[in-house]
Image (cartoon, grey):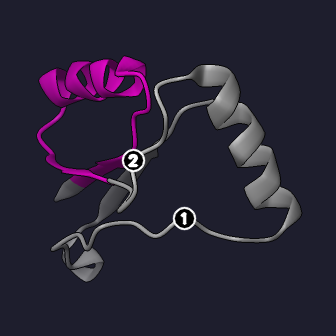
Amino acid sequence: MKKAIVYYSYSGNTKTIVDMIKEKVSADVYEIKPKTPYSTDYDEVVDLGQDEVNSNTLREIEDIDINLDSYDTIILATPV
């Protein structure tokens, strides 16, 4: 059973969890990266995120070279 982990990590916490999962299961790992990085100021990012939600806009991400059809299981990890 082939697995993939696709994740985005703003502060590094999600990446740490992904690394822990990777130690337990055999999986290919793919990072989601925004084309324009977010600010390192957390409050600024929260405000920007709220503006993006309110205006129904999506931040562009860099292309990921992945064929999802080749995986039986896909684990998606994001900040909460």
Residue 80 in the image: above or below residue 34:
above
Is 1 situated left or right of 7 in this image?
left
The one nearer the camera, 78 or 4, is 78
Spatial CA distance of label 1 from label 2 is 10 Å
Q: Residue furthest right?
A: 54
> Residue 40, how many percent across, how many down?
46, 26
> Residue 47, how many percent across, how many down?
76, 37
Residue 6 in the image: above or below residue 56:
above
Label ID, residue 69: none
Answer whether labels 1 and 2 touch (C-beta < 8 Å): no
The one nearer the camera, 43 or 72, is 43
Residue at 14% of width from left, 22% of height from top? 23
Q: Quadrant of residue 20?
A: top left
Residue at 54% of width from left, 32% of height from top? 79
Residue 5 in the image: above or below residue 55:
above
Residue at 71% of width from left, 33% of height from top? 46
Screen quadrant of the N terminus: bottom left
Characterize the local packing of mark 1: few (<14), some (14-19) or many (20 or more) Cα atoms within 10 angstroms: few
Identify residue type, mark 2.
Answer: Pro
Is 27 situated left or right of 45 in this image?
left
Label ID, residue 37: 2
SS of the residue under disc 1: loop
Residue at 62% of width from left, 69% of height from top? 58
Q: Is residue 57 magenta?
A: no
Q: Quadrant of residue 44?
A: top right
> Residue 27, how many percent across, how many down?
15, 45
Q: Quadrant of residue 12?
A: top left
> Residue 54, how many percent across, how many down?
88, 60
Please report the bounds of the magenta region as a residue range.
4-32
Identify residue type, mark 1.
Answer: Arg
SS of the residue under disc 2: loop
Disc 1: which residue: 59
